[in-house]
Amino acid sequence: MTVEYLDVLIVGAGISGIGSGCHLQKKCPGKSFAILEGRQSLGGTWDLFRYPGVRSDSDMYTLGYNFKPWNHAKAIADAPDILDYLRETVVENQLVDKIRYQHKVVSATWSDQSARWKVEVECGEPAEKRTIECGFLHMCSGYYNYAEGFTPEFEGRDSFEGQIVHPQFWPEDIDYAGKKVVIIGSGATAVTLVPAMAKTAEHVTMVQRSPSYLASRSAVDKTANWLRKLLPNKVAYFITRWQNILAQRFVYNAFQRWPQKSKEKLIERVSEQLGPDYDVGTHFTPNYNPWDQRLCLVPDNDMFGAISNGSASVVTDHIDTFTERGLRLKSGEELEADIIITATGINMQFLSDIKFTVNDKTLEPNNTLSYKGLMVSDIPNMAISVGYTNASWTLKCDLTCDYVCRLLNHMDKHGYTTCTPSNKNPDAKTDPYWNLTSGYVTRAAHLFPRQGTEEPWRLYQNYVKDIFMLRYKRLDDGVLEFSN
């Protein structure tokens, strides 16, 4: 049986994989490539999550690609509009025939002898095994475990007579109109669900063990819409994009430098929305500093509006047990519910839980270092697109895709077949890959590479720094080793 060979294999047809394909088409036009997608449709996160109100928590002028302007009036976009944007990108960049759906990668094996990846794929239903070889592997599958979300063990769960739903697996036929809904959780998903479901439910109650920081902003960027009327589309997009990038960075730096003042300001703004009689101290005052965990976005104050008009409420307590009719809390309070939503988080995974083998040695990610946030120490010819934790995901992915193209062209120019980040100081001090204390991050820290304390092993979470490091610094830096 003839084994197919491609120059580049991209894994994942979400926002990162589509971006990678676009960059390859433009900057490496002679390269053969395919995008493998395990699901039946493109879009990744934006197609997977179907719960009410699902939207971006970053503005689309920075979450959008640097090469394709965002033209909608709303900067904080709903998932269907983001999916339309991605589909347009695929058509405009001639990627339709490059995406192979229901192609799930199960293993990847590297051999120095052949200087190739041998990738085992399960295709279609029922699954048929197929082998594809490639010279370079670009992992664009994100870090969500699409097969399962995170749900803690709740006492008495089986006794509840109503419906229990995890947002990651939202049923199409669910009917919550006129019903009592309890949402467990205080993260971005819960904050999105509350105002969306409160429009038609009898009442929505968000139950949280501890609060998160909430930041409000308008869903519409008036300046961006005004600029589009005055300037060519691409120019207006460029200006708006950089304005928002710099504003995000300024706010993040301010929060890091003055955490207590920032905390007070965030809580003060919530109090302004909910009024002096609302117990903001209990329900909206976290016990950590801003950006120790991601902030939750509240577009147009929608959640605060739902609380103020009485269609939603927040309870801060621990769950004692599920009951036949709802939940009993540690305080003894009972909450009646027809539907309970477990917005309790995601499970993270590294490289989609694909089994990686390099020269007969199984990859153990936690024993490796992340190189420039996009490669892994001692793993040849592989890049990973992972976005920022403190800014829009696509900003980092655009830089990663651009870097991969630079790297491939550099290798072609000099006749190299292999590039490998080499960690020459394995005893050096390291830190966890992520700098957040969120539960979903700490639960999965052992699954990811670590980071070093200085460049090129340090993850700065800083777009401006990364521009200089990934676009303009030498590829042949003494750490990335090339061979033929």
Image: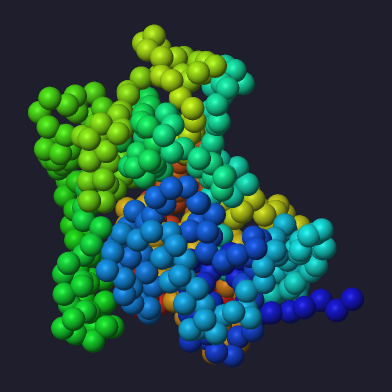
Q: Is residue 8 left or right of residue 227?
A: right
Q: Is residue 424 visible?
A: no
In the rendered image, residue 396, in percent from the top left (x then y), is placed at: 39, 65
- Residue at the extreme right: 1
Residue at (82, 63) in percent of width and height: 129
In the rendered image, the vertical position of residue 417 relative to residue 433, given as above or below: below
Q: Could you tell me residue 272's position as x and y percent?
A: 11, 38
95 vs 406, nearest the viewer: 95
The residue drawn where x is 56% and y is 48% is 172
Residue 472 relative to residue 279: left or right: right
Residue 411: x and y, percent? 56, 83
Q: Nearer the viewer, residue 368 or 41?
A: 41
Q: How is the image coloured?
A: rainbow
Q: Does residue 370 appear left or right of residue 145 in this picture?
A: left
Most distant residue in the top direction: 332
Hey, which quadrant is residue 138 in on the image?
bottom right
Q: Quadrant of residue 114?
A: bottom right
Q: Nearer the viewer, residue 83 or 416?
A: 83
Q: Quadrant of residue 435?
A: top left
Q: Residue furthest front?
A: 178
Q: Residue shown at 55%/89% (left/top)?
A: 29
Q: Quadrant of the N terminus?
A: bottom right
Residue 460 % position (x, y): 34, 56
Q: What residue is drawn where x is 54% and y is 16%?
A: 324
**Vertical side of 299 occupied by 396: above or below:** below
Q: Nearer the viewer, residue 422 or 296?
A: 296
Numbered marks: total: 0
- Specify whether 364 is left or right of 190: right
Q: Quadrant of the C terminus?
A: bottom right
- Is any atom of residue 205 visible in this view? yes
Position above or below: 199 against 324: below
